[in-house]
Image: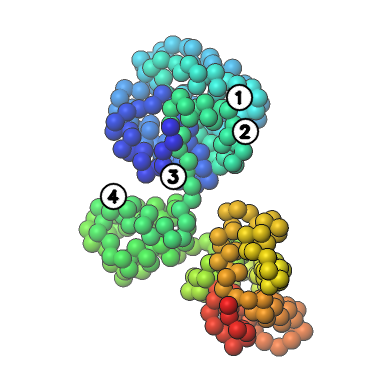
């Protein structure tokens, strides 16, 4: 049975499965989901816990031995397998499938992995564990969902935050869930439960945002002009070279220009993206950008890239960071003088 992390508390109030598989690339959610399962198990009398680290060279017979051995100190126990790579190998896959087929009595098995790719999620050991118990996939919280995640967590901590306080905290942590959780805990210590407004957050919460170049490109493709401005400022403050940002933007714009050229000759956006091997997960983002401009606009943005490249190399006058800002705004859909007719 598959559950979302936010469904776990309700599930644990009703029952405790014999097997749990936790995986994903959001460590905080994986950790807190595992903590919730352990806490519920302890409340039900699972007082013994055995942790197995399934790393390179791990002997999977240890799982069978742990399942078959009698507890020395408790009638109920937890066996926890930590497998960061998510690849148990043939021996591990067989051991996990065998356990899932006949879970040990009075025992809770919890398998904790990192991110499982699509092919890994279809492996037999995953499907067998899912059939025997509960599978929880812990996806990252995207920028649009982050304010809602923060507000829910703040209210659980006893706060009544204003919308401005939630938005400011979301901007300060910029997708870093661990930083958000730490800042909320710090607010609880310094401020105490109750109403929280924007000035309180501004005074007591540090800026924990971490930006990356490709995140800037995606924000521009998404059309988030204000976020582009903040991310560009963050990258500059972190010491990222202008030439790196110019390179990333130019690479994306060359691809978009080629796709726009194909579309100008009558090809559909879906066919063009498939031909250019755009990942399925990125097709909505790229499709949105392609609907924004016609071919001449993409060509104008590419010429802007060439101009910035000359400025960065000292071959033309100008401020590279100012020009990068103009380029990001243009890519995001902001109407600029350099842009030809829009679609």
- Seen from this angle, which residue lies furthest right? 315
- Seen from this angle, which residue lies furthest front? 266
The image's mark for residue 156 is 4
Is residue 186 among what the camera can see? no
x%, y% of residue 195?
A: 23, 62
The residue wearing badge 3 is: 29
Frontmost residue, 101 versus 241 = 101
State the separation of the CA atoms marked 3 and 1: 25 Å
Circles 4 and 3, Cβ within 8 Å, touching? The answer is no
In this picture, residue 243 sits left or right of residue 55: right
The image's mark for residue 92 is 1
The image's mark for residue 87 is 2
Chain-order first, disc 2 or disc 4? 2
Circles 1 and 2, Cβ within 8 Å, touching? The answer is yes
Q: Secondary structure at mark 1?
A: helix
316 w.r.t. 280: above or below: below
In this picture, residue 278 sits left or right of residue 129: right
141 w.r.t. 97: above or below: below
Q: Secondary structure at mark 3?
A: helix
Chain-order first, disc 1 or disc 2? 2
Which residue corresponds to the image point at 47% horizontal and 27% vertical from the top-left? Answer: 131
Circles 3 and 1, Cβ within 8 Å, touching? The answer is no
């Amino acid at each position: 049975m598959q559950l979302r992390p936010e469904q776990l508390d309700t599930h644990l109030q009703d029952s405790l499965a014999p097997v749990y598989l936790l995986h994903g690339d959001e460590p905080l959610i994986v950790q807190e989901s595992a903590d919730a399962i352990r806490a519920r198990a302890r409340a039900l009398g699972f007082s013994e816990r055995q942790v197995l680290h399934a790393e390179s060279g791990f002997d999977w017979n240890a799982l069978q031995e742990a399942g078959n051995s009698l507890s020395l100190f408790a009638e109920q126990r937890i066996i926890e397998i930590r497998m960061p790579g998510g690849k148990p190998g043939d021996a591990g896959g067989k051991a996990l499938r065998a356990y899932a087929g006949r879970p040990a009595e009075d025992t809770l098995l919890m398998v904790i992995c990192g991110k499982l790719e699509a092919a890994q999620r279809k492996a037999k050991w995953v499907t067998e564990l899912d059939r025997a118990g509960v599978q929880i996939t812990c996806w990252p919280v995207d920028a649009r969902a982050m304010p809602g995640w923060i507000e829910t967590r703040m209210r659980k901590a006893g706060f009544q935050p204003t919308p401005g306080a939630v938005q400011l905290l979301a901007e300060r942590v910029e997708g870093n869930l661990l930083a958000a959780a730490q800042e909320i805990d710090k607010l609880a210590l310094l401020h105490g439960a109750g109403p929280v407004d924007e000035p309180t957050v501004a005074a007591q919460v540090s800026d924990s945002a971490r930006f990356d170049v490709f995140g800037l490109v995606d924000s521009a493709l998404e059309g988030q002009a204000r976020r582009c401005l903040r991310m560009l400022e963050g990258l500059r403050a972190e010491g990222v070279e202008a030439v790196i940002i110019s390179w990333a933007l130019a690479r994306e714009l060359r691809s978009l220009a080629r796709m726009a050229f194909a579309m100008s000759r009558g090809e559909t956006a879906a066919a063009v993206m498939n031909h250019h091997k755009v990942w399925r997960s990125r097709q909505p983002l790229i499709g949105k950008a392609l609907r924004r401009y016609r071919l001449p606009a993409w060509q104008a943005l590419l010429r802007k890239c060439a101009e910035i490249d000359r400025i960065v190399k000292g071959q033309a006058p100008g401020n590279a960071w100012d020009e990068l800002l103009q380029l990001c705004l243009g890519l995001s859909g902001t109407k600029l003088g350099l842009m030809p007719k829009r679609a």
